[in-house]
Image (cartoon, rainbow, N blue to C red):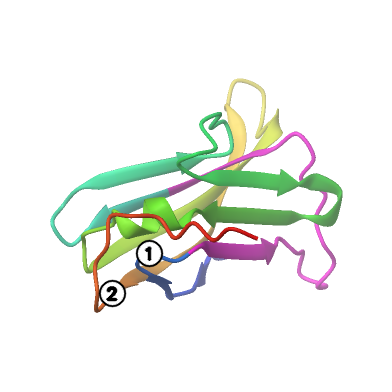
Amino acid sequence: MSAGNYDFNIEQGTSFRMSLVYKDANGDPIDITDWCARLTWRTSSNVTQTFTTENTDLTAYKFEIVGSEGRINFLLPASTTNALSFNTAKYDLELQANYDHYNQGGKYTVRIIYGTVTILKRNSKSSDALECQP
């Protein structure tokens, strides 16, 4: 199955969440337990940034797989989106299975979506995080 084209926006300085479910041709979720994912973008200024489910620094981003549901969640905190300075980037989102494609062929890897991410710039740029006290 070919990768889907999906363009999305990130509002600078706000929390961002993208969630999707990887499905088969019948529309049923595919179990991706023990798989990994990678989202790579190349900005309009030719800078490449990679996000993986192997990340352990959750202050920068969280990228998780809920395997039995076929769900992939990609989350950026407001502090990360506030620092994004590019206008647009081209991206690819790939999954890698926990099994070999064939003997000596490496792990089964598939690009599931690709497209353009656009940063919606803030009107009032602030380096201070919003810290509400209950």
Figure quadrant of residue 127: bottom left
- Left or right of 8 on screen, residue 109: right
- The quarter of the picture where residue 112 lies is bottom right
The magenta stretch spans which residues?
15-39
Q: Amino acid at mark 1?
A: Gly
**Residue 106 to residue 20: above or below:** above
In the image shown, does 70 or 60 lie closer to the viewer?
60
Instruction: Identify the residue at image location x=20%, y=48%.
Output: 47
Q: Which residue is mark 2?
A: 122
Q: CA distance from mark 2 to mark 1?
A: 7 Å
The x, y position of residue 32, in whole percent, is 76, 45
Q: Can you give x and y, in whole percent of width and height, for residue 87 in the image?
A: 22, 69
Instruction: Give the residue type that dot 2 points to.
Output: Arg
Q: Residue furthest top?
A: 104
Q: Within 10 Å of the Cα at label 1, are there few (<14), some (14-19), or many (20+) other Cα atoms? A: many
In the rendered image, residue 5, in percent from the top left (x then y), is placed at: 47, 73
Q: Main secondary structure of the magenta part?
A: loop
**Which element type, helix, strand or loop, lies under badge 1?**
loop
Residue occupied by mark 1: 13
Position of 24 with respect to 47 (left or right) is: right
**Contact, mark 2 vs mark 1 (Cβ under 8 Å):** yes
Regarding mark 2 in the picture, which secondary structure is present there? loop
